[in-house]
Amino acid sequence: MLRLKNLTKTYKTGDKALTNIGLEVPSGQVLALIGPSGAGKSTLIRCINRLVEPTGGEVWLDDLELTKLGSAGLRKARRSMGMIFQEYALVERLTVMENVLSGRLGYVGFWRSFLRRYPQSDVDEAFRLLDRVGLLHMADKRADELSGGQRQRVGICRALIQNPKLLLVDEPTASLDPKTSRQIMRLITELCRERGLAAIINIHDVALAQMFVPRVVGLRSGEIVYDGPPTGLSPDKLTEIYGEEDWEATIEAAEDDDEIEAAE
Ligand SMILES: Nc1ncnc2c1ncn2[C@@H]1O[C@H](COP(=O)(O)OP(=O)(O)O)[C@@H](O)[C@H]1O
Ligand SMILES: [Mg+2]
């Protein structure tokens, strides 16, 4: 169980990104955090693993208060939180396999990983994960030879090889075309289900969120303005979250895509 209590973040510039956020995510639950650009989605998930230091409030993962930890404790706690990024954050000149194994850095000591001596059990698990995401045949390719969708699959494997209990996912599909976006969302949510993983998936695209998760949290200007099932997102609610942005057009576009896909 992840618990945020009165989580607040004001950046040094004076930007108030989050105000008194309260949120509970039970073990194994996958939720989508939606909201317009600048709403505070990235700040929220980064405050959880303290890539961004909160200015107030508490973050609890099970019985551990993450906001109280010193650097050694935090390093250890971060093992249980996998992260997936919009821009994949792969090391371009390394192979797919090496990128996946780098997810074990929190466990394997620096020198061992520097010398690329990962335990055989890690290598075996990397092969299993690559097989699961359909990239076994790409294990020896360099990351810079991959398509966007393939890169994100590597990003997913790198997060999962950490054996986390929580996945923090920041706009995983923002750099992908609509069809690949759906495949990646399906893959992430399926893997969470298979492994009993909780996840917070930041996603700008309402339609994609609605397709794949049972719970949606809507953020606007650093405050939660919706928390419930995707079916509860009425047009009024969406306007409250997104303001005057044309969310209706994005939903219609996604429906058109689905019809095309169904016809293929
Ligand atoms: N490093 C930073 N320094 C100052 N302000 C920031 C920083 N990162 C984000 N912000 C501000 O915090 C607010 C929330 O940003 P962000 O968390 O990136 O939102 P989102 O991910 O929903 O687009 C915005 O007003 C943004 O300008
Ligand atoms: Mg963001």
Image (cartoon, grey):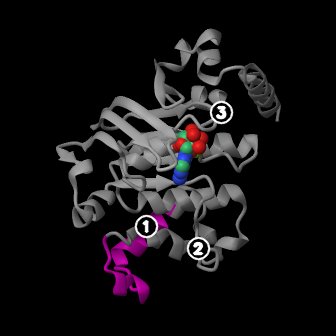
Residue type at tag 2: Val
Q: Quadrant of the C terminus?
A: top right
Residue 234 locus on image (x, y percent): 60, 11
Cα distance between the residues tagged 1 and 3: 28 Å
Residue 5 locus on image (x, y percent): 29, 33
Crowd rating for badge 3 (residues with CA inside 10 Å; few <14, some 14–19, many 20+) = many
Disc 3 within 8 angstroms of ligand 2 (CB): no
Could you tell whether 196 is left or right of 86 in the image?
A: left
Answer with the quadrant where ligand 2 appears in the image.
top right
Cα distance between the residues tagged 2 and 3: 27 Å
Q: Main secondary structure of the magenta part?
A: helix
Which of 217/128 is in front? 217
Could you tell whether 73 is left or right of 97 in the image?
A: left
What residue lies at 60% left-to-right and 59% top-to-bottom? Answer: 88
Q: Are marks 1 and 2 in contact (CB under 8 Å)?
A: no
Which of 128/220 is in front? 220
Vertical placement of 69 versus 96: above or below? above
Judge whether residue 92 is colored magenta.
no
What residue lies at 46% left-to-right and 32% top-to-bottom? Answer: 31
Which image quadrant is residue 115 in? Answer: bottom left
Crowd rating for badge 2 (residues with CA inside 10 Å; few <14, some 14–19, many 20+) = some
What is the magenta range? 107-129
Vertical placement of 201 versus 82: above or below? above
What residue sits right under mark 3 in the picture?
205
Disc 2 within 8 angstroms of ligand 2 (CB): no
The answer to whether any part of residue 87 appears in the image is yes
Residue 259 locus on image (x, y percent): 79, 26
- Give the number of the disc on residue 91: 2
What residue sits right under mark 1 in the picture?
103
